[in-house]
Image (cartoon, coloured by chain):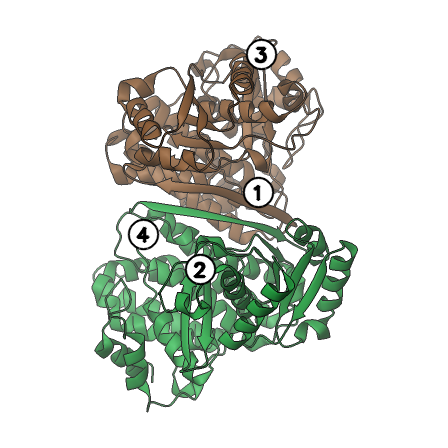
Chain colours: A green, B brown
Amino acid sequence: MNNFEWVCPTRIIFGKNTEERVGEFAKQYSNKILLHYGQGSIKKTGLYDKVVNSLKNANVEFIELGGVQPNPRLSLVRKGIEICKKENINFILAVGGGSVIDSAKAIAAGVKYEGDIWELYEGKGTLKEALPVGVILTIPAAGSEASMGSVITNEDGWYKRSINYDILRPVFAIMNPELTYTLPPFQTAVGAVDMLTHVMERYFTNTKNVDLTDRLSEATMRTIIKYAPLALKDPHNYDVRAQIMWAGTVAHNGLLGTGREEDWATHDIEHEVSGIYDVAHGAGLAVLFPAWMKYVYRHDINRFAQYATRVWNVEPDFFNLEKTALEGIKRLEKFYKEELNLPITLSGLKVPDDRFEEMAEKATEKGPIGNFVKLYKEDVLNILKLAK
Amino acid sequence: MNNFEWVCPTRIIFGKNTEERVGEFAKQYSNKILLHYGQGSIKKTGLYDKVVNSLKNANVEFIELGGVQPNPRLSLVRKGIEICKKENINFILAVGGGSVIDSAKAIAAGVKYEGDIWELYEGKGTLKEALPVGVILTIPAAGSEASMGSVITNEDGWYKRSINYDILRPVFAIMNPELTYTLPPFQTAVGAVDMLTHVMERYFTNTKNVDLTDRLSEATMRTIIKYAPLALKDPHNYDVRAQIMWAGTVAHNGLLGTGREEDWATHDIEHEVSGIYDVAHGAGLAVLFPAWMKYVYRHDINRFAQYATRVWNVEPDFFNLEKTALEGIKRLEKFYKEELNLPITLSGLKVPDDRFEEMAEKATEKGPIGNFVKLYKEDVLNILKLAK
């Protein structure tokens, strides 16, 4: 087990009607806020009106900035920073999923960062301060509601890059599972993939003696695996949606990484794919993570056998642990294909193979990626080919 | 699943040599602190010198208050409050186990509370503000390093009472498993019981559809069950001590209660026993929790069967789930007796039966206790008799 530091001060406000209390919570931070959201679905569902009413009742003034797209764009972030500076806004409320929250975090960072915000995403400069961000979550997937991360796409070159700072963890996250009833099946499915992958990126590690972290991870994965198909079948079932929603937060608030090295190579590769093709993040991961597994599992067959047995109930073959390990990967792929109805190849995602070279190049331009196994350009290329 | 609010902002600083950084962390809160500890074991082990050096290097002035006893006393709390007020101290560093931390929290509350501190423990008055508390943990057991609770014993009548406030969660907890190498076997064992009971008090609930919380709880219990006996056999094994130490925090930081009603009747009963007899808290729980289980399991045999199967690997007898449930209780008792070498009867703890009536009376003087099953005086008496 490695030394670690971990803190997650996000206040979780979970359950029915909790969105009606947003004014009360926002008020604790500011009387004038930026209300940040996506492409208007919150207006169709009535959530927008509820939020506006709650803010007005609490005498919280707000300026709106909607229009966040999936794979949130740097240009809108810049616009948000400008508004906050001009209007003297010192709190951002993100109403939406991971894209909206990540965009809000980028604005929160940019307002306080003296240089250009993209510098941070390029790994230059260090963020010391950020505005507080509050969240009403509508899409359980990215875990951004309690995570330290923000992923932004720069349209100039289609670079998709991330930053991670404890000060970017939202100060509160309001989570009402009812708000997820209207999610289309595809978004429910790719959300589940995103969550599962957040756990798996941490689970496949070279650090020994992390049994508690392993078991907590397995608990979270089993929950997602059980409830995601139920959410597809019965989208208005509160208890099902609640399990999924809470699992998405636990998957990515940092608890499941405590004491160990994490990997994240697949996320890096996926960012190159969805940076170019605008593929849904979770859909990309559903294709790439199994391919990554097939490419690296020999590095630690025992860990893959443990995963197969504890997560997928594969009966261990003690005379052939490799077979056990492979069966776990097969079950994951089968789950994505048959239970979540997702493509499990890049071609199924309509991603052609003619820019693999470019993606592999960009993914590794700062050096090898991943920790479980270090991946060089050639390795990334091989994984993309395995995913073809 | 119930609506819930949960926040745990304690910064965990975990691993080897982390205690040497205490000055750096304390400094973030104050230049003048109260250094609070127990009965001097930290001087024997050399920890005291390390702490003092680190504080001096960071130019943090400190006033000492040692002498915290197990089942920490109100009189010392009052003394601490007096010192802090007189010396204008606004940060408390607790170096020790749950007793020292609980005493520090009580002082932190008392300095800011306008009335008498015991009022709060009696359930009168509300705490709105408290000094920040930092921790160097030496005994993994109580989980107080990241919990909202503080338990104090009033020598005037030997009342043992608790308070719970989010503002009492320590701001940081430094946790070096090496500091637990010298714990006597008995303390290691009763610490594990305390942790397990913190999970079980939350696990036996009437709230339906809490699968993630259940599974995270089972993960934590299995870890404690696996590593506690190993810690007794091999007390200087870092990895074993690390698993136990981290499990103790996860067991009681609130995560495992999210979305459900908790019980806590056994803690209430134990507080009456150890309030009178000065029995170690965990030793009391090792006797009383199995007795409680035997008294209430018929209330939800399915939940007890799930516990037996998922936590103790009992093969479920689907034609006799009661038998499965009972086997789980038997395994727990056997574990306490044979693996942790603890008494499993009150007489084994040298607690006679002549004051059962008084304890049952005091435990229920404000009304029935517990939530899984509401217990009245007669029920508490029956449980004490079952534990005899």
Report which residue position mark 3 lands on.
B158
Is disc 4 placed on a helix, strand or loop?
loop
Viewer-side label of 2, 1: 2
B314 or B32: nearer the eye?
Answer: B32
Is A38 displayed left or right of B16 in the figure?
Answer: right
Q: Which corner quadrant of the image does residue A116 belong to?
A: bottom left
Distance from the alpha carbon under mark 2 to that under mark 4? 18 Å
Viewer-side label of 4, 3: 4
Report which residue position mark 1 lands on.
B301
Distance from the alpha carbon under mark 2 to that under mark 1? 26 Å
Q: Is residue B249 above or below residue B289?
A: below
Which chain's residue wears label 3?
B
The three-letter amino acid code for the residue at tag 2 is: Met
Circle 1 Cα neighbour tier, 10 Å, few/some/many (<14 / 14–19 / ≥20): some
Of mark 2 and mark 4, the one earlier in the sequence is 2
Is disc 2 placed on a helix, strand or loop?
helix
Q: Which corner quadrant of the image does residue B268 belong to?
A: top right
Q: Is residue B206 above or below residue A374?
A: above
Q: Are marks 4 and 1 on the same chain?
A: no
Distance from the alpha carbon under mark 4 to that under mark 1? 38 Å
Q: Are marks 4 and 3 on the same chain?
A: no
Distance from the alpha carbon under mark 1 to that under mark 3? 36 Å
Report which residue position mark 4 lands on.
A260
Circle 2 Cα neighbour tier, 10 Å, few/some/many (<14 / 14–19 / ≥20): many
Q: Is residue B226 visible?
A: no
A123 or B175: nearer the eye?
Answer: A123
Which chain's residue wears label 1?
B
- Find residue A372 and report its horizontal and vertical position in percent: 26, 62
Is disc 3 placed on a helix, strand or loop?
loop
The three-letter amino acid code for the residue at tag 3 is: Trp
The image's mark for residue A221 is 2
